[in-house]
Image (spheres, rainbow, N blue to C red):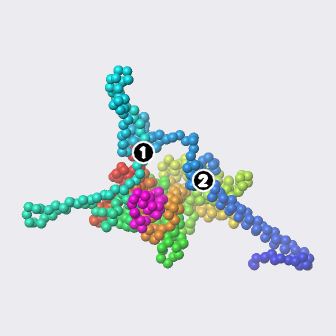
Amino acid sequence: MKKQTLLPLSSQQLNNCSKDELLSLCKLLMAHNQEITAKLDFMTQQLALAQHQRYGRSSEKSNPEDGVKQLSFCFNEAEVQASSDVTEPTIEDIIKKPARTKKQKGKRQQDLSDFPVERIEHKLSEEACSCPHCSSPLKVINRELSNYMKFVPAHFENEEHVVYVYGCTNCECDHIERAEKEKPLLRGSVATPSVVAAVINGKYVNSVPLARQEKEFQRYGVNLSRQTMANWIIRCTEDYLSLLYDALREELLSCPAIQCDETRVQVIKEDGRPAESDSWMWIYRTGELTEQPPIVLYNYQMTRQAQHPKTFLSGYKGYLTCDGYAAYHSMSEDIVVSGCMAHVRRKFNDCLVALPAKDRKGTVAEEALKRLALLYKIEDFLETKTEEERREGRLQQSKPILEAFFEWLKPMEVAADSQSLIGKAVKYALNQQTYLETYLLNGLIPIDNNAAERAAKAFAVGRNNWMFCYSPNGAKASSIIYSIVETAKANGLRPYEYFSYLLETIPQYLDGKQREFIKDLMPWSSTLPDRCRSNKK
């Protein structure tokens, strides 16, 4: 049926209208006003939500005191963060050590034992080292020891290798022996593992673009162009680090529960595509409730099509936790998809913050958040339980609450305006019901996908600094390096030391076809040197 529209009518036309025509016109006018009011309400909610997202607290917790205070990433951060109430930290505060069962003698010295020591002694001069009463020489009767932190800025050194060549000078046999030297990291390059690891650490851990690193190196008297650094990153990734990435992917696919997410990335030199086109970084990680060591992998792809997770997870059998994106719902029959309760909670939270504070009490959004909060409280209680205990606890406690939640929502799907925030929240929750209930089946499935989202945010922080990748090769290299960085951090490693060790070790094994040495380089390997670990025990 064609939709009627309101046309401007003159006074004469209105006077000539019959009673039925006037009634019809009034009904049409009322419907038109309702539509405008609904659109105005929706736009008002969207404006309030946008203002909250930009200026408000990001936590979805109902009590502001439970939320984590956000850092101020602004120019005057020093003034904002400074406080006279903050106590000056001690050496023990700065250098955290594992908790000890009882106090030990010389604790401060033990805390600093891993650092080089520069001893500065304070002694009396010969003239002052005599007793003012009897003029006898003073002797040392005690030493007062104090420790302070000192920072030594980064510096470059010239690593000069001298290979000695030996030959017999006693006869005319022309026999020559050459001393062995480890293979260079990159043939024909001055790059060393320490320098490349520093560049990687700067860009992928501290989010410092290569252009800024280039300027910083110049201040140390080193002219190292961003193009050269980019070449080093790509070559080392393709030749060495990709081997570790492949091993991590194989290990990931053996995990019974995996989490997945995706985020945008811009690659300006993709064949046949405009520079402003969106490409995608897919994130896969081990389920946060599994007992396997944490693995976080990034996978660069040009599109957001379903074929990409299908290919990456080819051969996988287990549970996959993700958001409501339809691409995840066409996976192999061996993969059981689980939904994200945090997405549901977020949509109802958006409804609440879009309303004035005085109008929030007693709303559908508030009630929905209260019901969802009960599910999360149960998860907090079950956090330390075994897989089976968690499954049983969910069936006994969470299942009735979740079933009642969906039954409560169903009548509202018709009653709520489908274009309003609350209408969309209700519809999303009901559409995802099957996937949201999956976590009840197994104690290894998380209630939400927040762990994968945190991994996506780690990438987004860097992206906000370097803005885009120049080429597909660069994007692929970035995906591999980010994977190793985040996996190393999740396993308690120092990324710089770990990359330095990888680049020292892998090139020495590449002559043979055996790849058994890779298992000793995994981030959880007990054979890694202590310098790679951030928390020494």
Q: Which residues are magenta?
A: 200-228
Q: Is residue 150 left or right of residue 433?
A: left
Extreme residue toward the front, this view: 127
Residue linked to disc 2: 59
Residue 14 badge: none
Q: Position of residue 210 (x, y in %)?
A: 45, 63
Q: Quadrant of residue 170?
A: bottom left
Foreground residue, 449 or 522? 522
Q: Nearer the viewer, residue 176 or 75?
A: 75
What residue do we see at 47% from left, 61% from top?
212
Image: 504 above or below 476: above
Classified by dominant secondary structure, the portion drawn in magenta counts as: helix
The N terminus appears in which quarter of the rendering? bottom right
- Tell me where residue 29 appears, x and y as whole percent: 82, 71
Can residue 410 be seen in the rendering of this structure? no
Res 150 label: 1
- Closer to the camera, 16 or 191? 191
Q: Is residue 94 magenta?
A: no
Q: Amino acid at mark 2?
A: Ser
* Mark closer to the chain start, 2 or 1: 2
**Residue type, label 1:** Lys
Please identify, in this view, whether the residue under mark 2 or under mark 1 is nearer the observer: 1
